[in-house]
Amino acid sequence: MLKAVNETRWSARADVLRAQVTSRNETKNAIEDLIEDNTQTPDTRVTGEGFRKILESFQTTLLTVIWDEILQRVDKTSEILQREELDLLCATKEFLTLSLFLSEKRPNFDDYEARALQLVNVPEPNYEKIEKRKFFSDEKRYPDFERMYPRERFRAGVFLPIIGNLEASFSFKRFICLIVKIYSDKYRGLRSKAED
């Protein structure tokens, strides 16, 4: 069953994506029933049609598969980080493990693509409908990027930035934990000397 996203918890996002991956056919059938139900308002039926198109989209499915795996791991790490008995050194190790997990996913785009193809049940991926974003007047354009095949553009412009930004975020959090640990150890050392 699909759940509404709670804005503050990784686990809520992980649960929603897990439901989208594992209950995909049930969700699609429910949406199709809604579309075919003549007792529904035209707006509701049109909205259902839009949801069905999104659900059947290869790119949406690909992003769902990518984010599902990432958020399942982030959710497990988050649970560990919330334990009261966890110290800063262990927290640092958890962020390192998460960063390593993400860096291992960098070359796995083909695997994600294969899983998405299986879920959508189509023989070939469809990257053709990628809308080109609008550029600001002061923004630099990269002609080589724009000339890439749509699949490579998706990999380089969507998948790799997701992985890279998350890696950087978790590395920064690890760095902060180390700094706090160092200063708290120094503070404890100074306090114990002052008490002696």
Image: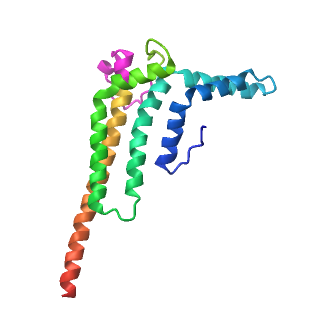
Q: Is residue 97 above or below residue 160?
A: below
Q: Residue furthest right?
A: 39
Q: Nearer the viewer, residue 82 or 50?
A: 82
Where is residue 185 shown, x and y percent of the image? 22, 70
Residue 132 appearing in the image: no
Where is residue 60 shown, x and y percent of the image? 49, 26
Q: Is residue 79 left or right of residue 42?
A: left
Q: Is residue 107 left or right of residue 45?
A: left
In percent of the image, x 45 and y 23: which residue is there? 116
Where is residue 122 shown, x and y percent of the image? 48, 14
Quadrant assignment, res 73: top left
In percent of the image, x 20 and y 72: which residue is there? 186
Figure quadrant of the N terminus: top right
Q: Nearer the viewer, residue 139 or 165?
A: 165
Colour scheme: rainbow
Quadrant assignment, res 104: top left
In percent of the image, x 37 and y 29: which residue is there? 159
Figure quadrant of the C terminus: bottom left
Q: Residue furthest bottom?
A: 196
Q: Is residue 8 left or right of residue 107?
A: right
In percent of the image, x 36 and y 65: which residue is there? 85
Q: Nearer the viewer, residue 147 or 72?
A: 72
Quadrant assignment, res 160: top left
Q: Is residue 88 above or below residue 128?
A: below
Residue numbers of the magenta segment = 133-155
Where is residue 161 shown, x and y percent of the image? 34, 33
